[in-house]
Image: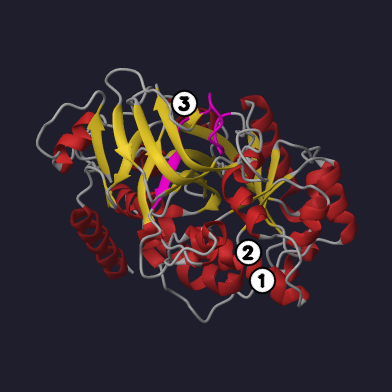
Amino acid sequence: MQSSPTPSPARPPHSRRDILTGLGLAAATPLVLGITDRPARPPAPVGPTVLLRGASLVLTMDPALGSGPLGALDNADVLMRGGTIAAVGTGLRPPPGTRIVDASGKLVMPGFVDTHTHLWQAVIRGGCTDGDLFGWFTRCTDPQRGRLTPEALHSFVRLAALDAVQSGVTTLVDWVDIFSYDLIESYVRALAATGVRFTYAMFPSETDPTLVAKVKKELVDPVPLADFQVATHAARAVQHINHAHWEAAQDLGVMLNSHVLERPEQRADDPIGVLTDIGALGPRLLINHAIHLTDDEIAAVAAHDVRAAHCPLSNMRLASGIMRLAEFGRRGVKVGLGLDGGTNDSSDFHALMKTAIGLQRARATQAAIFPQVHDVLRMATLGGAEALGIGDRTGSLTPGKRADVVVVDPAALNFAPRFDWVGQTVFNGRPENVEAVFVDGRPLKFDGRLVGVDTERVVREAETAATRLRAAG
């Protein structure tokens, strides 16, 4: 991608450093921080003014801006100013000093919204491959969680968050059951340093009920791009804890985030019944997986505007089952997609979209079933934002929303030749096709590389930390 100021007098070609400096983020300024550094400086409240000029296709996700359900525009510009989408259209006249990025031959769309993940589980990527959900808990997550140090945790979270960013994720929700304040501080610091928009969903400790408010106030609220949720595991045996978590969420004015019926054995927990009994069923509840719900439970979820996160790659990996996504779609439930951390093994959102379609077709043995390509693209962007209650802020390229934008380069062996770029984005796309990622108008990836990130160092420190943890076991 090429960038130049406006107006553009004759001058030598820009170096990558010139471009990044003009975009407000010099390559020499690293985003990664060592654990001994000061807390991560939050992203600037406003991004630079940037015009993505002449994109061959822009998927706005706003039907009012373009054609079809995805609001598609051909040969269009996207202007980002002050961290927001300022305008979308053809032949836009940028204000003086705007950085012009040539997007000809490219596809521009909103960034992906990962509605459910566990970033720290990067330490056990590819592990316990012969285990189901309970085997994963017993042999992978439980032993590693108990050995975590702030330094190791920082390395794993940073690694996984940057992997998500480079695949086009601009917003993520991290469900975290880590309790000590020093570990939580390390976790939030690592997330904030990447520049991604994130929600920290905290599973509160029974032993310290005040910790949840402390974490929100001291660690999450000061980060401009951060939100907070209270996490729980809904089950009859711990209904009193679920009730306390719901009360904490209400007190803090945030969503409750619960795993629900990921495995058929969890039917005995009656999670939907528990969530109903404690009064949590409603638009401030996000349920993850939601695979083994009955017809009546899906109807109740829809009637109360409960939100859901669908994690098809993880569900396959752990032999958990296939969510009845078509039924959720028929009833109008707001559903987003989730990578689900270590059991997804990578952060390939294109694979996630393709699988979300493929599993439903395999289950129904028909191709006309929900979701279709436009449905899953919406789930990956605006649908995910709506599920999180932030659809008024992000998820589409509607002017006034935050400038969370990705630029995709289809001129690649896995993508070309052009037939139907909308379909190819889902079925052909891979993270390496994501050429640029902007969050709040700031470039986190540009020219196919993460900006200001020493990736070799990130990988090296994660490898070192993982080796130490295994040795400690």
Residue matched to label 3: 221
Q: Toward the viewer: 119 or 10?
A: 10
Alpha-carbon distance for marks 2 and 1? 6 Å
- Quick check: is 404 in the magenta stretch? yes
At a point 13% along the width and 40% down the height, the residue shown is: 13
Q: Tell me: residue 16, above or below residue 269.
A: above
Instruction: Using residue 196 as the reference point, say whether residue 202 is left or right of it.
Output: right
Mark 3 vs mark 2: give the one in front. 2
**Disc 3 to disc 2: CB gap under 8 Å:** no
Residue 389, picture quadrant: top right
Q: Position of residue 266 (x, y in %)?
A: 73, 65
* In the foreground, 117 or 331: 331
Query: Mark 1 falls on what kind of element?
Result: helix
Mark 3 or mark 1, earlier in chain: 3
Which residue of the protein is positioned furthest toward the top in this rendering? 96
**Image position of 181 (left or right of 379):** left
**Residue 413 colored in magenta in the image:** no
Mark earlier in primary sequence (3, 2): 3
Observer-nearest residue: 230 or 59? 59
Residue 73's place in the image compared with 219, above or below, is below
Could you tell me the amino acid type at mark 1?
A: Leu
Disc 1 designates what residue?
359
* Above or below for 139 versus 422: below
